[in-house]
Image (cartoon, rainbow, N blue to C red):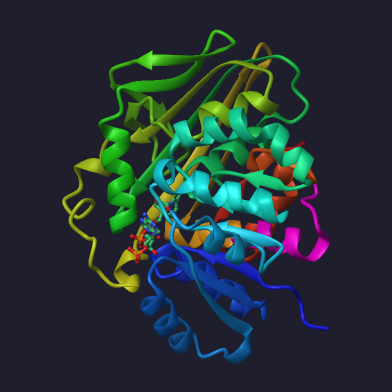
Amino acid sequence: MSAAPIAVYGATGHTGRLVATELLARSHPVVLGGRDATGLIELAAELAEGDRVTVRPAALDEPAELRALTGSAPVLIHCAGPYSRTGEPLVAAALDTGTHYVDHAVEIHHVKHLFDAYGTAAERAGVLVCPGLSFYGGFGDLLASAATGGATVVQKVTVGYAVSGWRMTTGARHTADQLINEVERITFAGGAQRIGPQPMYTTSFAFPPPLGDREMIGPFPTGDAVTIPRHVPTRDVEVLLTASTFAEPQVFTSEHVDAAERAQTAFTVAVDVRTAEGTRSAHLTGHDIWWAGAVASVEAALDLALDGKAPGASSGVHSPAEAYPAGPFLRRLEDLGAFVLDLPDA
Ligand SMILES: NC(=O)c1ccc[n+]([C@@H]2O[C@H](COP(=O)([O-])OP(=O)(O)OC[C@H]3O[C@@H](n4cnc5c(N)ncnc54)[C@H](OP(=O)(O)O)[C@@H]3O)[C@@H](O)[C@H]2O)c1
């Protein structure tokens, strides 16, 4: 009997294509979903995998089409952003059809909204909803869990994203525009989530060699500040991005470059977890944030498709580290070549 397929929404986009290609590389069937029927049919022809690929066009304002898509697979990987616009209709359809949901969201407001609005419904539906299982948001959340180990009191978690050579897609550009102009920022300080106007600031963060001390901007509005306090007993979370990332000339002008050029990112994600006993650090380093994020979502979705649940959670809304125990999951991604990992001893 052949495996049940995994549905990919936004399959015609850069992330969607990477995800579909990765699934097929593991001989796993896919259902290509999105609003552009012609583009989906062309993509299916390009992938040339015969009956391993099915096409199901579905517009966001057509709930029946969305349910037909989510109902065709036990798992959906949602790859079309900005998620503040596209997320909710897909989550609703997934809950209706009992389909596990994984997305690539950077947007902290979307991540918070899924926890606040869908936790109980996802449990009732027996469905796992896991937002931000990708590079931004996901890797910080997983590293924070791995670095914390068994610490029961944590003063502060600092997540530093160092990214160079980022070439944004149209979807990423729209997401970034929205995040940069956001007025209400969600942060976690003094043991509480805070929402309100907060200006961006610059500070420094010490990455492991060869990067060393870097000028950073914060608060970087990825989901980490919402997800990390769910599983790390910390008073503060600070999320930062290298200031040089947005100063590079190609970052906002590369919407139409090809996949090979877009793959030329270099990244380090480093997390410091400060406790009364000292600081525990973890980091990962690699190239191509898009591919690394795609592989993370694919591995997570394969667990859901093949085992019917994630190792850490079977239903409800959960962060990547809550659903996928961080050390083993990160090691698995390292084995696939997504990055090189440095974790503290357990
Ligand atoms: N967390 C991370 O590290 C991470 C990593 C990768 C991607 N992402 C996020 O994933 C999203 C997609 O990125 P990408 O690089 O794949 O962008 P992309 O190449 O521009 O593709 C965007 C996809 O979303 C679809 N889409 C956009 N608006 C839509 C709408 N209103 N209804 C239906 N489909 C819609 C597009 O469909 P059309 O082709 O019909 O326009 C396309 O398939 C972005 O929000 C990005 O921030 C995050």
Q: What's drawn in magenta, residue-wise? A: 298-311
Q: Which residue reaches farthest top?
A: 190
Would you say residue 232 is visible in this rendering?
A: yes
* 54 left or right, relative to 216: right
Asked if the magenta segment contains residue 126, the reply would be no
Who's the residue at 61% across and 73% down the image?
23
In the rendered image, residue 294, in percent from the top left (x then y), is placed at: 52, 61
* 307 left or right, relative to 7: right
In the rendered image, residue 110, in percent from the top left (x then y), is placed at: 48, 36
> Looking at the picture, does residue 36 appear above or below residue 196?
below
Magenta highlight: main SS? helix
In the rendered image, residue 320, in percent from the top left (x then y), is placed at: 64, 43
Asked if the magenta segment contains residue 310, the reply would be yes
In the rendered image, residue 345, in percent from the top left (x then y), is placed at: 74, 38
Q: What is the count of numbered marks?
A: 0
Q: Quadrant of the N terminus?
A: bottom right
Q: Nearer the viewer, residue 30 or 62?
A: 62
